[in-house]
Every structure is written in C-alpha cells, then in structure tokens.
Image (tube, rainbow, N blue to C red):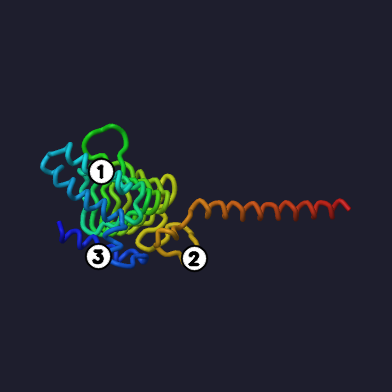
Amino acid sequence: MFKTIKEDIKVIFERDPAVKSLLEVILCYPGLHALIIYRIAHRFYQKRFFLIARFISHVGRLLTGIEIHPGAKIGKGLFIDHGMGVVIGETTEIGDNVTIYQGATLGGTGKEKGKRHPTIGNNVVVASGAKVLGPIKIGDNSKIGAGAVVLKEVPENCTVVGIPGRVVKKDNRRLRPVHKEIDLEHGKMPDPIAEELNKLRERISELEDYIYKNRKEDKNEAV
C-alpha cells in the first residue's frame, strides 16, 4: 500500500507543473486522497465485503468530490487532476499511466449487468468533462478531448473530439484538415465543427462573389 502511494505521489510531481512540495501533495490533492480511499475500498470489495467497500467509497466521494466504485480495476500511475465531478463506474478497467481531468465520466449505459463500463488503455488522457460510456475500449496512447462524448471504441494512438466523439487524428496523422501547429495537449484539440463552418463560410463567400459578378455583367449588357 505505501509503495503504491509513493508511486501515486511521484506521478503528481511528474505531471502537474503547479506542485510545490511533498506536503502540499499529501494535504491538498483530492486525486491522491481519492486513490488511497479507493485502494482501501477495493481490498474490501475483493474480499466480498461489498457494503463496507461501498461505504468507504461513499465517504471518499463526500471528502473529495471524486466517485470511484470499489469494483473498478485501476492500474499504476493514474493521475486525477483537480478531480471534482470525476465518476468511475464499477466495471471500469484503467491501464497504466492514465490521466483524467475534472468532470470526466467513465460510465455505463442501460441496466444490463456484467461488463457495462469502458476499458481504458495505457497512457490515455481523458480531458475535462469528457464522457466515455458503455463497455467500449479506448486504445493505448489515445486522447479524449474536453467535452467529448465517446460511445464507440477508439483505436490506439488516436485523438477524439466532439459529440458524438469522432477520431480526428491517428498515429500522428491528421484524418482531415486541421489547424496548423496543433499538438496533442488536451487543451489544443482539433475542432472539426469549426473547420466545417469555416468551409461553409468560404463557400458562401465564393457564391456571393459569383452572384455579384454575374449581376454586374447583366447590368452592363442591359446598358
């Protein structure tokens, strides 16, 4: 347990540029607190003390604003940044070195039993407010953009944005024209809706110029 906590603290120093000291991490990082409480609750859940596990999880939710079901399976190196409003469902599986930002949901759909929550691969980033719903898989090294709603499986090395979520980048190759100099930071995702609107504006402008030109020619002919 203590070894795992040390690893969780190390991850915070690696990924959060705002961190100042070890004491700050221990006292002021709800993501770390939520993980510690989850690991305790998960132990009870594995031993089939379900009520105790859920109660511990519930207390953790009240203290941190982060809800992690004790039945979820979480790998090493999970970093929950800020964390308020994060929800991780019962049958969720999270790989190693995953980063989750505030307001993200790894949830289920419907009332079916069994596997009903997503499986998140290694080195995945789930940005602020993103919703990944259902028993789908998010491939390794993928990025889920802020506010995206993902309902279908995502291959490895992809960038997903929008509602519903659409893959706009794969293996560092753009699948459609996007703004230049865009990297994979979760705050600088491509915006396919804005791109389509820009195309429409350009097309409308071309059509207006065409109409204006033809009207001018018609007037000249009439004179």
The residue located at (35%, 43%) in the rendering is 151
Q: Quadrant of the N terminus?
A: bottom left
Image-based side of 174 in relation to 66, left or right: right
- Percent across and percent down for residue 73 are 20, 48
Residue at mark 2: 180
Q: Earlier in the sequence, mark 2 or mark 1?
A: 1
Q: Amino acid at mark 1?
A: Val
Q: Residues within 10 Å of mark 2 (few under 14, many from 20)?
A: few
Q: Earlier in the sequence, mark 3 or mark 2?
A: 3
**Contact check, label 1 and label 3, Cβ < 8 Å:** no
The residue located at (49%, 65%) in the rendering is 180
Residue at mark 1: 59
Q: Residues within 10 Å of mark 3 (few under 14, many from 20)?
A: some
Q: Nearer the viewer, mark 1 or mark 3?
A: 1
Q: Nearer the viewer, mark 2 or mark 1?
A: 1
For the residues marked 3 and 2, what is the alpha-carbon distance in whole angstroms?
A: 34 Å
**SS at badge 3:** helix
Looking at the image, which is closer to me, 71 or 2?
2
**Contact check, label 3 and label 2, Cβ < 8 Å:** no
Residue at mark 3: 10
For the residues marked 1 and 3, what is the alpha-carbon distance in whole angstroms?
A: 25 Å
